[in-house]
Amino acid sequence: MNVIVRVSALVHPTEVEEKVSKAITNLFPVELRLRDFGTPELHGEGDLESLRLLHRMLREELILDTARHILLTGMEGNTTQFRLNKQVAFAGKLNFPGGEESLGSIYVEISAGDNDELIRIIDWLAPETIDGKPVGEIVL
Protein backbone atom coordinates (compact mmCIF):
# COMPACT_ATOMS: atom_id res chain seq x y z
CA MET A 1 0.00 0.00 0.00
CA ASN A 2 1.46 3.32 -1.12
CA VAL A 3 0.64 5.78 1.70
CA ILE A 4 2.32 9.11 2.36
CA VAL A 5 1.51 11.01 5.54
CA ARG A 6 2.62 14.63 5.77
CA VAL A 7 2.37 16.59 9.02
CA SER A 8 3.29 20.19 9.74
CA ALA A 9 2.72 22.99 12.23
CA LEU A 10 3.87 26.58 12.42
CA VAL A 11 6.01 27.61 15.38
CA HIS A 12 4.76 31.05 16.36
CA PRO A 13 7.03 33.52 18.21
CA THR A 14 5.12 32.87 21.46
CA GLU A 15 5.68 29.09 21.20
CA VAL A 16 8.60 26.85 22.10
CA GLU A 17 9.78 24.71 19.18
CA GLU A 18 10.30 21.64 21.39
CA LYS A 19 6.69 21.81 22.61
CA VAL A 20 5.32 22.06 19.08
CA SER A 21 7.53 19.12 18.13
CA LYS A 22 6.21 17.11 21.08
CA ALA A 23 2.61 17.93 20.11
CA ILE A 24 3.20 16.50 16.63
CA THR A 25 5.18 13.44 17.68
CA ASN A 26 2.65 12.60 20.41
CA LEU A 27 0.33 11.71 17.52
CA PHE A 28 2.64 10.91 14.61
CA PRO A 29 6.02 9.23 15.20
CA VAL A 30 7.86 10.96 12.37
CA GLU A 31 11.19 12.73 12.11
CA LEU A 32 10.60 16.48 12.03
CA ARG A 33 12.60 19.15 10.25
CA LEU A 34 12.42 22.90 10.61
CA ARG A 35 11.95 25.19 7.65
CA ASP A 36 11.51 28.93 7.79
CA PHE A 37 9.83 31.05 5.15
CA GLY A 38 9.07 33.92 7.52
CA THR A 39 7.39 31.86 10.26
CA PRO A 40 9.22 28.69 11.30
CA GLU A 41 7.41 25.45 10.51
CA LEU A 42 8.07 21.91 11.69
CA HIS A 43 7.25 19.29 9.10
CA GLY A 44 7.69 15.59 8.62
CA GLU A 45 6.66 12.71 6.44
CA GLY A 46 5.74 9.12 7.18
CA ASP A 47 3.95 6.08 5.86
CA LEU A 48 1.15 3.79 7.02
CA GLU A 49 3.11 2.95 10.18
CA SER A 50 2.98 6.60 11.25
CA LEU A 51 -0.84 6.33 11.37
CA ARG A 52 -1.00 3.40 13.82
CA LEU A 53 -0.97 5.62 16.91
CA LEU A 54 -3.77 7.77 15.46
CA HIS A 55 -5.70 4.57 14.69
CA ARG A 56 -5.46 3.47 18.33
CA MET A 57 -6.25 6.90 19.79
CA LEU A 58 -9.41 7.32 17.69
CA ARG A 59 -10.77 4.19 19.34
CA GLU A 60 -9.58 5.05 22.85
CA GLU A 61 -11.13 8.51 22.68
CA LEU A 62 -14.35 7.17 21.10
CA ILE A 63 -14.36 9.69 18.25
CA LEU A 64 -14.62 7.39 15.24
CA ASP A 65 -17.76 9.06 13.84
CA THR A 66 -16.25 12.54 14.03
CA ALA A 67 -12.98 11.36 12.55
CA ARG A 68 -14.70 9.54 9.70
CA HIS A 69 -16.74 12.63 8.84
CA ILE A 70 -13.64 14.85 8.84
CA LEU A 71 -11.54 12.40 6.80
CA LEU A 72 -14.27 11.99 4.17
CA THR A 73 -15.04 15.73 4.05
CA GLY A 74 -11.34 16.51 3.56
CA MET A 75 -11.02 14.16 0.57
CA GLU A 76 -9.95 15.41 -2.81
CA GLY A 77 -8.90 12.72 -5.26
CA ASN A 78 -6.48 10.34 -3.59
CA THR A 79 -5.71 12.72 -0.69
CA THR A 80 -7.46 13.79 2.50
CA GLN A 81 -6.48 16.74 4.68
CA PHE A 82 -7.46 17.69 8.21
CA ARG A 83 -6.27 19.68 11.20
CA LEU A 84 -5.67 18.74 14.83
CA ASN A 85 -5.46 21.02 17.85
CA LYS A 86 -1.83 21.63 18.78
CA GLN A 87 -2.40 22.26 22.51
CA VAL A 88 -4.56 19.16 22.96
CA ALA A 89 -1.99 17.10 21.03
CA PHE A 90 0.74 18.34 23.40
CA ALA A 91 -1.30 16.70 26.19
CA GLY A 92 -1.39 13.45 24.17
CA LYS A 93 -5.05 13.70 23.13
CA LEU A 94 -6.97 14.34 19.90
CA ASN A 95 -9.21 17.24 18.97
CA PHE A 96 -10.41 18.31 15.56
CA PRO A 97 -10.81 22.10 15.79
CA GLY A 98 -13.98 23.64 14.44
CA GLY A 99 -12.23 26.62 12.90
CA GLU A 100 -8.95 28.48 12.69
CA GLU A 101 -6.98 28.52 15.93
CA SER A 102 -5.03 31.49 17.24
CA LEU A 103 -1.78 29.49 17.49
CA GLY A 104 -2.53 27.43 14.41
CA SER A 105 -3.09 23.71 14.13
CA ILE A 106 -1.25 20.57 13.21
CA TYR A 107 -1.93 20.03 9.51
CA VAL A 108 -2.18 16.45 8.28
CA GLU A 109 -2.33 15.18 4.72
CA ILE A 110 -2.77 11.51 3.87
CA SER A 111 -2.18 10.48 0.25
CA ALA A 112 -2.69 7.05 -1.26
CA GLY A 113 -1.97 5.45 -4.61
CA ASP A 114 -5.55 6.01 -5.77
CA ASN A 115 -9.01 6.93 -4.49
CA ASP A 116 -9.97 3.32 -3.63
CA GLU A 117 -6.81 2.90 -1.57
CA LEU A 118 -7.55 6.14 0.31
CA ILE A 119 -11.10 4.96 1.11
CA ARG A 120 -9.60 1.74 2.47
CA ILE A 121 -7.24 3.72 4.72
CA ILE A 122 -10.15 5.86 5.97
CA ASP A 123 -12.19 2.70 6.59
CA TRP A 124 -9.24 1.34 8.60
CA LEU A 125 -8.67 4.54 10.58
CA ALA A 126 -12.31 5.36 11.25
CA PRO A 127 -14.75 2.62 10.23
CA GLU A 128 -18.49 3.09 10.08
CA THR A 129 -20.11 2.55 13.47
CA ILE A 130 -23.39 1.57 15.05
CA ASP A 131 -23.93 3.07 18.49
CA GLY A 132 -20.30 4.18 18.49
CA LYS A 133 -18.93 0.67 17.89
CA PRO A 134 -17.14 -0.23 14.63
CA VAL A 135 -19.28 -2.26 12.23
CA GLY A 136 -16.15 -4.04 11.01
CA GLU A 137 -12.43 -3.64 11.43
CA ILE A 138 -9.97 -3.79 8.53
CA VAL A 139 -6.44 -5.03 9.13
CA LEU A 140 -3.70 -3.07 7.40
Image (spheres, rainbow, N blue to C red):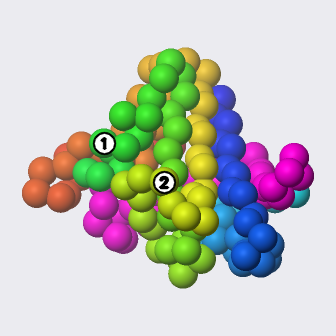
Tell which circle, 2 or 1, labels the residue nearer the N-terminal end: 1
41, above or below 27, in the image? above
- Amino acid type assigned to the residue bearing label 1 in the image: His
Q: Nearer the viewer, mark 2 or mark 1?
A: 2
**Which residue: 73% across, 66% down?**
12
In this rendering, position of residue 69 left or right of residue 34: left
In magenta stretch: residue 45: yes
Q: Secondary structure at mark 2?
A: loop
Residue 75 x/y as whole percent: 45, 29
Mark 1 lies on residue: 69
In this rendering, position of residue 52 left or right of residue 138: right
Q: Quadrant of residue 63?
A: bottom left
Residue closest to the eye, 112 or 87: 87
129, above or below 30, in the image? above
Quadrant where the N terminus lies? top right
**Which residue: 83% across, 58% down?**
40
Few, some or many residues within 10 Å of mark 2 (<14, 14–19, 20+): few
In magenta stretch: residue 53: yes
Mark 2 lies on residue: 100
Q: How many marks?
A: 2
Residue 99 x/y as whole percent: 42, 53
Q: Quadrant of residue 32?
A: bottom right
**Which residue: 42% across, 64% down?**
95
Q: Which residues are magenta?
A: 36-64
58, above or below 51, in the image? below
Res. 21 visible in picture = no
- Amino acid type assigned to the residue bearing label 2 in the image: Glu
